[in-house]
Amino acid sequence: MFKNLYQRFCDENIVGRFIFINVAVYIIVAFIGVFATLFGFNNEVDAFVRWFELPASFGTFICRPWTLVSYMFLHERIMHILWNMLALYCFGRIFLSFFSLRHFVGVYLFGGIVGGLFFMLAYNIFPHFEGIVDSSFLIGASASVLAIVVASAVRSPNYVVNMALLGSMRLVTIAVITVVISLLLLASENAGGNFAHLGGAFAGWLFAFMLNKGWDLTVAINKIIDFFATFFKRRRSGGRAKFTYQRSDRTADYEYNARKKENDAEIDRILEKVKAGGYASLTDEEKKRLFDASNR
């Protein structure tokens, strides 16, 4: 069973893998909660899960810095995760038509991190939250999803999305409506979640805006991921710095197509920049990439 699940996970694209992780975490936590309630130790389980939720208190956060990442993979209710994963599935595929796989990973994490920071800052700045800072926590992938949505909207604002019950809407319209709703709900019961939404939206906008200027804000995040991936690979190989393995043709084709899609997306971005500001607006690196692409 677990082998089949792992194979299904490996066969998914990057959007499917993130959905898989979120759903798996939700199911595991939910099952543990059911048995904990039946056997009378749900308080202990709740206290344990709390160690992975993002606290509004900076004092608590200092003792649990990993929560700035772990919180974005936790969900409380079935409808909470359902809507987030449906949005991630829909807009994640749109995102990948404009950006690369590594951009998706970086923006998901970047949006969640900035959203979490917005949440903590809001609860420590505004007097409205003064009495509930120590008891407030944040969970959910909403900030990450909104970063994906806004980044896609900045890249292609006129992209048309067919929304169930609402008909066809431009991507920029969806992004603006979502941001406006979050602004209107900043003093609601879910104020923390809406501040996180705004942080995620800002992160998505900032990523797309800076990428158009030649700066990829996801590079640092992906380098950290690469570092830990390499570290664990070496540990699994017995500590050897180098090891060899045989890749299947399917894996090789997948990696080739992923690299090709990433390169094509970068060239499209550079061409859009030339169209908007002329060849002189390109950096030396962008000019080199455009020259190399024209000679292929």
Image (spheres, grey):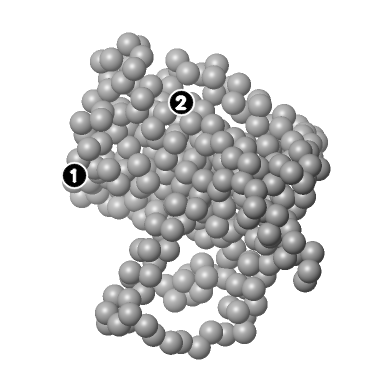
- Pointer 2 local density, CA inside 10 Å: few below 14, some 14–19, many at least 20: many
Q: Which mark is residue 44?
A: 1
How much space separates mark 2 and mark 1, taking CA atoms? 29 Å
Q: Residue at x 74, y 61 (%)?
A: 291
**Nearer to us: label 2 or label 1:** 2
Going by the numbered disc 1, the residue's amino acid type is Glu
Q: Report whether residue 127 is seen.
A: yes
Q: Is residue 78 above or below residue 199?
A: below
Name which residue lies at 65% across and 48% down: 283
Q: Nearer the viewer, residue 9 or 202?
A: 202
- Label 2: element kind: helix
Left or right: 206 as drawn, with respect to 29: right
Give the residue drawn at x 67%, y 70%.
Answer: 257
Q: Earlier in the sequence, mark 2 or mark 1?
A: 1
From what the image shows, is residue 252 above or below residue 161? Answer: below
Please tell me in which quadrant of the rendered image residue 173 appears: top right
Which residue occupies 27% across, 79% down? 239
